[in-house]
Amino acid sequence: MNYIDSGLKVVGTRPIRPDGVEKVTGRAVFAADTRSAGMVWGKVLRSPHAHARILSIDTSKAAALPGVRAIVTGADFPNIASEEAFVGEGPMNFRDLSLNVIARDKVLYEGHALAAVAATTQAIADEALSLIDVKYEVLPHVIDVEEAMAEGAPILHDDMFTSGVSPKPTKPSNIAKVVTFKKGDAEAGFKEADVIVEGRYTTKPVHQAYIEPHACLVTYNPDGQTTIHSSSQGHFMVRAYTAKLLGLEMSDIRAIPAEIGGGFGGKTLVYLEPLAVALSRKAGKSVKMQMTREEVFRGSGPTSGATVEVKIGAKKDGTIVAAKQVLKYQAGAFAGSPIGPGCMCGFAMYDLPNIDVVGYDVVSNRPKVAAYRAPGAPITSFAVESLLDDLALKLGIDPLTLREKNAAKNGTKTHYGPTHQNIGFTAVLDAVKSHPHWKTPLKPGQGRGLAAGFWFNIGGESSASVHVNEDGSVTAATGSPDIGGSRASIGMMVAEALGVSAERVRTTVADTASIGFTHVTGGSRVTFATGMAATQAAEKVVEDLKRRAAQTWEIPVEAVEWKDGKAYPAGSNAGAFEPLDLATLALKAARTGGPIQAEVSVNAQGAGAGFGAHICDVSVDKETGQVTIERYTAIQDVGKAIHPSYVEGQIQGGAAQGIGWALNEEYIYNDKGQLENPGFLDYRCPVASDVPMIEAVLVEVPNPRHPFGARGVGEVPIVPPMAAVANAIRSATGLRMPDLPMSPPKVRAALDAAG
Amino acid sequence: MAKQYVSTTINGESAEFLCETQQTLLDVLRDVVGLTGSKEGCASGDCGACSVIVDGRLVCSCLMLGVEAEGKSITTIEGIAQGEKLHPVQQKFLEHAALQCGFCTPGLIVATKALLDENPNPTETEARYWLAGNLCRCTGYDKVIRAVMDAAAVMRGETV
């Protein structure tokens, strides 16, 4: 059923989320909040070297320490063959993941795990780590993406031969693959251009910086049956990866989702769980593990640092005739940067006749990158949206007009294949034009920047069940960890379909043994795909309730209609009966067929791409180089906001993360390839006093593939901010800042250089 | 080394515990006393997820030793609500959707209570600087600050 044009009573309102009270009272149970009788503590030994061969690991002294219950090294894990996995978000190779969880022959980055210890106390576990004697042969290392691509660079993997080039290379390389996308003839297009602009942009690796460090509590039983309680963006992902890496049956693993304290893509893969299971197996005890913040920075997934070159050619009237882009993304120690989306997203917002894009996926001695909110898109859009600003300036055209002129519309064929359908980019740009922020004159000394952003959004596999309880209240369960309010949105869709209030429906996240397979909470997919499954389950329940009413009244089911949570006879011909509400039908459920419930699994298609545009005003302190965000407005097509507050929250949070990426956040390495700022003091995430109110403007162009018109909203908002800030700085100072972060020393240096 | 005996007050009730001298108050609260509402986000005093109020002063419990709690009065997130009744700050966080993942929320609520105890009528700027020690990665702070300002108004009796 499609509810888009029906009178909605619940969807679009702002009820208090069902898990809210637990979370404001400290009762919500996150992964590190659980204990088990007789449990021991697991800790990880990590490489101090950016690149080294492991010559030997002597654990004898550590094993002899009183209180130590188990030690594992790479030798305790099976070697996994190279095999592509589609378990998390983005491509992953099972072998690489195994080698990332625990190193075998070589450590490939500072922080790479190479052994783990379980002991009766954390202090003993720490002491045991210090007693493990590792002999290394330190190897030359490389961090920067272009240095890693250069001739003579230290090679991370002797068996890595660049794919996607012809002829097949004969020498190993740090370039894992080259990807190309072409549309039309870019070279011919540039010949027609009146104006050509070019730019070269660099970004630093940044971390997702969820506030909750990775944690788990694991029990391996002697019969192999294992319970994993952990914080992740998908417990089915945890089960799949852990089973594969340890050679266990999936049915022997029950993965229980803890509350998750943020992920942003960084919890779509495993780090601790396989180590904890191996330790628990050896120790015969439950094992609890939790990363320190330093370990999170050193050992878990930031996103790529990158170099991006862009060239755009346009006619005098602003019509873009050709565009070219070369992207080089750090993958970290193993292949798999988000270079694909990087190549696709930069130009995806525009209707361009001739496009030529080349992307390089490059390994270097940094933690393996993990997905980070619209993986790959913020980097490419920082480059493209910055250059569009320069183009507008050169042409003397307003930057909004330039984007309007070239905006992708329904029917625009992208350079990577699909044709845009049911998109709302034009509506977003219209909303920019009419917004007071865009029309308000700038204050003296301030600059204003505009930038747009795109993300595909995904659908995929989800399961949900809806149970009508004996008293007529409703319980919905899904397989999607709730990372930002999805219990609320799922419950509201179920309530709407059933015709009851939001408060009548309580939503839980079910473990891997209690609900059908559900893909990770990522790709902005939960409200779309899991919401679709839950809505369909509610509709099945409604059909069942109508059948039960028909049975009670002894009339045909076609003569029953469901309205506002009650069965009514459909018209006077059906007979005169008092309506039957949920509670009455539930009470008599035993006599009408037993418990009332339905579970639905879907592979949801048609997620509906998301577009946004951000307006940013800044002031720049000429003495210190400090950039202050004075006003910020984020406009986005959200399809349909199920719970508008949490949609706004996604947009505001994404914008703030993007502002951090723009102004301050970066991984800083020393000459040994060691991270120098693995803490929140020196890795500077935005704090409350760094940002103003962020106005989120919801544009609603319904997605016809979703029962309520929803499209994903969580990732688009991190795409525009870097260019929006950069363009605002350019507006305020006349300086183009092509290198992130635009931190005070860099801005100050640019101001000085410009005199 | 022998564990130390500590006698203190937690959330208005007298409490005793044994802890090792190097254990932080956060570790004691979570691992010894069993109050896991205070979170460890960094263990270095940078994120504020472990915020508690000690004798009226807002502190990061990861930067204080358990033994230093001797004779002190400690308020944790578990002590903010009065029985069944949520504190106005908690209520306004819910109404304004000022939380997403909820991990930083206990610390933010404790820090906000400490702010409003000291300054019942903060400006937005004062609230932002007071809460600058509490990292939230999900919300961008917008709804958090709105909840704080609204809670302050309620506590001043200006609105409900």
Image: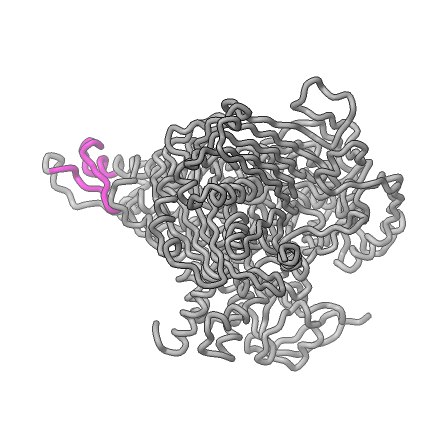
Picture coordinates of residue A568, whole percent (x, y):
19, 41
Asked if residue A8 shows in the view, the reply is yes
Picture coordinates of residue A3, whole percent (x, y):
29, 39
The residue sitting at 66% across, 63% down in the picture is: B31
B63 relative to A424, above or below: below
Q: Is residue A227 left or right of residue A482?
A: right
Residue, far left: A572
Q: Is residue A98 left or right of residue B74?
A: right
How is this picture coloured? Answer: one colour
Q: Is residue A381 magenta?
A: no
- Residue range in magenta is A549-571
Q: Is residue A566 magenta?
A: yes
In the image, A250 versus A204, the foreground residue is: A204
Picture coordinates of residue B143, whole percent (x, y):
44, 61
Picture coordinates of residue A651, whole percent (x, y):
46, 51
Question: On the rendered image, what quadrant is the N terminus of chain A found in?
Answer: top left
A66 relative to A417, above or below: below
Question: On the rendered image, what quadrant is the C terminus of chain A found in?
Answer: bottom right
The residue sitting at 48% across, 61% down in the picture is: A630
Q: Is residue A463 left or right of residue A125?
A: left
